[in-house]
Image (spheres, rainbow, N blue to C red):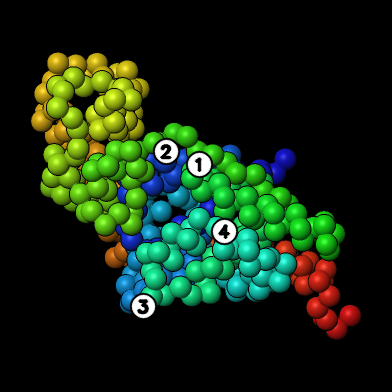
């Protein structure tokens, strides 16, 4: 019996945080044995915001190396760069023609990015969800792993798939969101009511997977806590609860065990211990990423093989779509 298909993509813009690692990438490593996984580096999505070309290329390679360093196995999944598989753009055009402007204008991400990039409100920014729908639907996945805050994009993908199927006959599998709970609650170190984000303008708010040990410890020392001196999980202690959650996630223990570890300790010692635990956990990942980036021949071969597998899988769906909508193929 074949595994069910799972699809996910991440942009190579900005640095991934420990929230991305604990909430997504570590889950993906586990999922490789449960699903037929497609993991894309979404460089086409990245250019909806102005990018420096050389930096975009570098970050694409760094993200691929980071995936591999974290345990993504190219023998057990398909890891590829989105722009190397032309079917993404081709299917997006076909789906554009059954998607309504009003739907795109209502998307939260379009509104947010339009405010942040008021001098560059381009059609790609508005059309982002249609390209994302094409990314997903090409591979006929059963599941799309997302955080609870990203469900809207899966919902529009489902709407587009259902509309296409109703108009042209059964073509796309309608995917389900796979809500990942473990590690998903890692919050900003400066505003613990907010999710930790790779695009946060406050450099002390997020811990990046590429931060060195001194930087990691410095950021945790500056983490927002409270005027109390008790280390426990509580809704009234958002900063401390966040740090306990981070510690538990990277130490491999429960929240209750984390609380017991630090009972009676001061905030200073607690923050230092959390920082050291995170830094020590990331050290082997960072070392392996550096090794992979120094072996460009291997890295390129992995991405080329992934693109070839993705191409074969995507062309099956695209050919079916083209036939359904009436494109002439010489028959």
Assign a secondary structure to mark 3. helix
The mark closer to the camera, 1 or 4, is 4
The residue labelled by disc 2 is 184
Q: Assign the N terminus to one quadrant of the image.
A: top right
Q: Residue 53: which disc?
A: 3
Mark nearer the N terminus (4 vs 3):
3
x, y percent for residue 232: 26, 20
Q: Is residue 17 above or below residue 15?
A: above
x, y percent for residue 176: 65, 44
Assign a secondary structure to mark 2. loop
Q: Residue at x 64, y 55 (%)?
A: 157
- Examine the image and state in which quarter residue 300 appears: bottom left
**Other residues around mark 1 within 10 Å, as few (<14) / some (14–19) / many (≥20):** few
Mark nearer the N terminus (4 vs 2):
4
Compute the Cα span from label 4 to label 3. 30 Å
In the image: residue 307, left or right of residue 330? left
Mark nearer the N terminus (1 vs 2):
1
Q: Residue at x 33, y 61 (%)?
A: 14
Q: Is residue 265 above or below residue 24?
A: above
Q: Residue 295: which disc?
A: none
Tell me if label 1 and label 2 are in contact, CB under 8 Å.
Answer: yes
The residue labelled by disc 1 is 148
The residue labelled by disc 4 is 106
**Other residues around mark 4 within 10 Å, as few (<14) / some (14–19) / many (≥20):** few
The mark closer to the camera, 1 or 3, is 1
């Amino acid at each position: 019996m074949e595994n069910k298909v799972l699809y996910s993509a991440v942009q190579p813009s900005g640095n991934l945080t420990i929230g991305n690692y604990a909430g997504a990438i570590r889950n993906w490593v586990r999922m490789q044995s449960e699903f037929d996984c497609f993991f894309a580096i979404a460089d086409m999505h990245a250019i909806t915001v102005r990018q420096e070309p050389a930096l975009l290329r570098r970050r694409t390679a760094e993200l691929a190396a980071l995936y591999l360093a974290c345990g993504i196995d190219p023998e057990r999944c398909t890891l590829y760069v989105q722009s190397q598989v032309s079917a993404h753009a081709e299917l997006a055009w076909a789906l554009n023609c059954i998607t309504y402007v009003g739907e795109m204008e209502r998307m939260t991400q379009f509104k947010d990015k339009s405010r942040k990039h008021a001098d560059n409100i381009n059609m790609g920014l508005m059309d982002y969800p249609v390209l994302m729908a094409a990314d997903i639907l090409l591979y006929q996945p059963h599941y799309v792993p997302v955080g609870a805050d990203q469900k809207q994009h899966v919902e529009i993908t489902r709407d587009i798939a259902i509309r296409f199927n109703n108009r042209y006959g059964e073509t796309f599998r309608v995917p389900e969101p796979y809500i990942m709970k473990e590690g998903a609650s890692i919050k900003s170190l400066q505003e613990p009511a907010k999710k930790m984000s790779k695009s946060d303008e406050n450099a002390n708010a997020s811990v990046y997977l590429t931060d060195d040990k001194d930087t990691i410890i410095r950021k945790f020392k500056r983490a927002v806590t409270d005027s109390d001196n008790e280390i426990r999980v509580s809704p009234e202690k958002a900063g401390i609860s966040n740090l306990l959650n981070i510690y538990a996630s990277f130490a491999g223990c429960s929240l209750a065990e984390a609380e017991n570890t630090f009972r009676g300790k001061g905030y200073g010692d607690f923050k230092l211990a959390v920082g050291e635990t995170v830094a020590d956990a990331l050290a082997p990942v960072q070392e392996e990423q550096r090794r992979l980036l120094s072996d460009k021949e291997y890295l390129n071969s992995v991405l080329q093989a992934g693109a070839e597998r993705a191409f074969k899988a995507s062309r099956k769906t695209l050919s079916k779509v083209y036939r359904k909508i009436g494109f002439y193929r010489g028959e």
